[in-house]
Image (cartoon, rainbow, N blue to C red):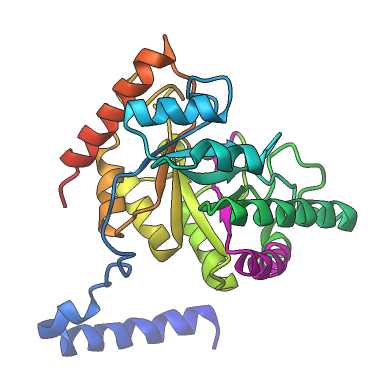
Amino acid sequence: MNRRDFLKNSASVVATAAIATVSTETAFAQPSPPSQGEAKCRISSQEAPMPGRNYKEKVENLIAYGGDALELYAKNLNVAEALEAIKGTPIVISAICAADGPYIVPDKTQQRKAVDNAKMLLEKAGELKSTGVIMVPAFNWAKDQLEGREAYKLLIDLLHELGEHGVKNNSRMVMEPLNRGEAFYMRQIAFGASICQDVNSPGVCMMGDMYHMNFEETSDQAGFMSGGPWLHHVHLASGKRNLPGQDKRSFVDGFRGLKRIGFHDFMSLECHPLGKAEEEVPKSFKFLRDQWEQATV
Ligand code: MG
């Protein structure tokens, strides 16, 4: 049957079905994604926005400002120092940022280099009991970047291997969609979630960054909901990539989406504070907790 015949036949089938089911239209309602549990506002910060010369001082400031977790950079990551810094405190390590590839390139040596680096970071992320290791399949600058079906198939294959290693090491890869100016491949949470669904490993999940989402998602709430059970980390920045609260960017709609999926992992500052960080970061934490309260569902 060609496309024209198919459409003609479908039209009559749809019309008949509509008449037959007019009294049971709620049967077609899409269910919400299954809840991850009780939603919680748990605030983290990457190293840079947090004042302090080392992990220990940053942890002390996080406690003073009412934060919950510290996100560490993969570069110069020191597991022993981080464990010592959080020992006996309520602070935990949220995520490790990042295992940058590129992954979706034809060069097998580069693919292997990217996967081996990510595996090494997964082992460290497991020791730190963190959320996982953030990764971007390929930034725009990646030479010979693959596209479409070829990129998809390769990414799924590599993630199967990484997911297995993640499970073995009590950790997982956390894919991050970016805006088109930085990485054209995987710009929306729904696309990342479909990759997670195909890999179907507890060692592979994804995140949403509200700075990038501002460009790419038609709705913050719907964007987070499309991540459903696969969404396990969030990055936060204002519209101009400063601290949340330093411009008019609202987080309320996004937080509604997080509440609807029962998100209880960490939301982490990834931004450049305007003014003195010692004064501005605590204000931003308070702003975020207020926005969370306003996000009624
Ligand atoms: Mg980010």
In the image, residue 285 above or below residue 294: above
- Residue situated in front as seen by the camera: 94 or 98: 94
Asked whether residue 274 appears in the rendered view, the answer is no
Asked whether residue 118 appears in the rendered view, the answer is yes
Whether residue 155 is in magenta: the answer is: yes
- Residue situated in front as seen by the camera: 142 or 94: 94
Residue sitting at 69 percent across and 39 percent down? 140
Report the side of 164 relative to 220 (left or right): right
The span picked out in magenta is 153-181
Whether residue 22 is in magenta: the answer is: no
In the image, residue 291 above or below residue 5: above
Please provide percent x and percent y for residue 75: 70, 35
Please provide percent x and percent y for residue 274: 43, 13
Residue sticking out furthest to the front: 88
Residue sticking out furthest to the left: 23
Residue sitting at 47 percent across and 53 percent down? 189
Residue sitting at 46 percent across and 84 percent down? 6
